[in-house]
Image (cartoon, rainbow, N blue to C red):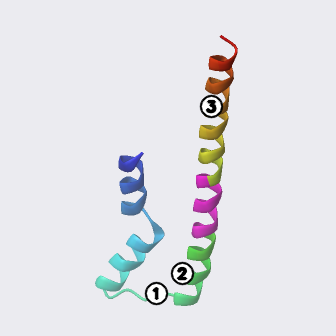
């Protein structure tokens, strides 16, 4: 999972904005802020979905142990 996070950071919207700024490109900061807010909300959704999946799997394993 750590490798996936590193790859996501390399390809993130902010990484592109940083590259654009370093290259002297124009950046629409209002648009970047709005999109970054959506990216953050999406990351929360993904985290929650993954966490619920892990919890469901742990509950399933616990039920198996209790039913043995």
Q: CA distance from mark 3 to mark 2?
A: 37 Å
Q: Quadrant of residue 9?
A: bottom left
Q: Which mark is residue 57?
A: 3
Q: Is residue 25 left or right of residue 50?
A: left
Comparing 38 with 62, the one in front is 62
Q: Is residue 9 above or below residue 37?
A: above
Q: Residues within 10 Å of mark 3 (few under 14, many from 20)?
A: few
Determine whether the residue tagged by mark 3 lies in a helix, strand or loop: helix
Q: CA distance from mark 1 to mark 2?
A: 8 Å
Magenta stretch in the rendered image: 39-47
Comparing 66 with 64, the one in front is 66
In the rendered image, residue 16, in percent from the top left (x then y), is placed at: 40, 72
Q: Residue furthest top?
A: 68
Q: Which mark is residue 27?
A: 1
Q: Are marks 1 and 2 in contact (CB under 8 Å)?
A: yes
Q: Is residue 67 above or below residue 1?
A: above
Which residue appears at 41% of the width and 54% of the height? Answer: 5
Residue 61 in the magenta stretch? The answer is: no
Q: Is residue 35 left or right of residue 15?
A: right
């Amino acid at each position: 999972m750590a490798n996936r996070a590193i790859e996501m950071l390399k390809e993130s919207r902010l990484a592109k904005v940083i590259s654009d700024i370093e290259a002297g490109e124009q950046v629409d900061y209002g648009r970047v802020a709005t999109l970054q807010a959506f990216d953050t909300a999406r990351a929360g959704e993904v985290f929650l979905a993954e966490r619920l999946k892990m919890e469901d799997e742990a509950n399933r394993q616990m039920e198996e142990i209790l039913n043995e």
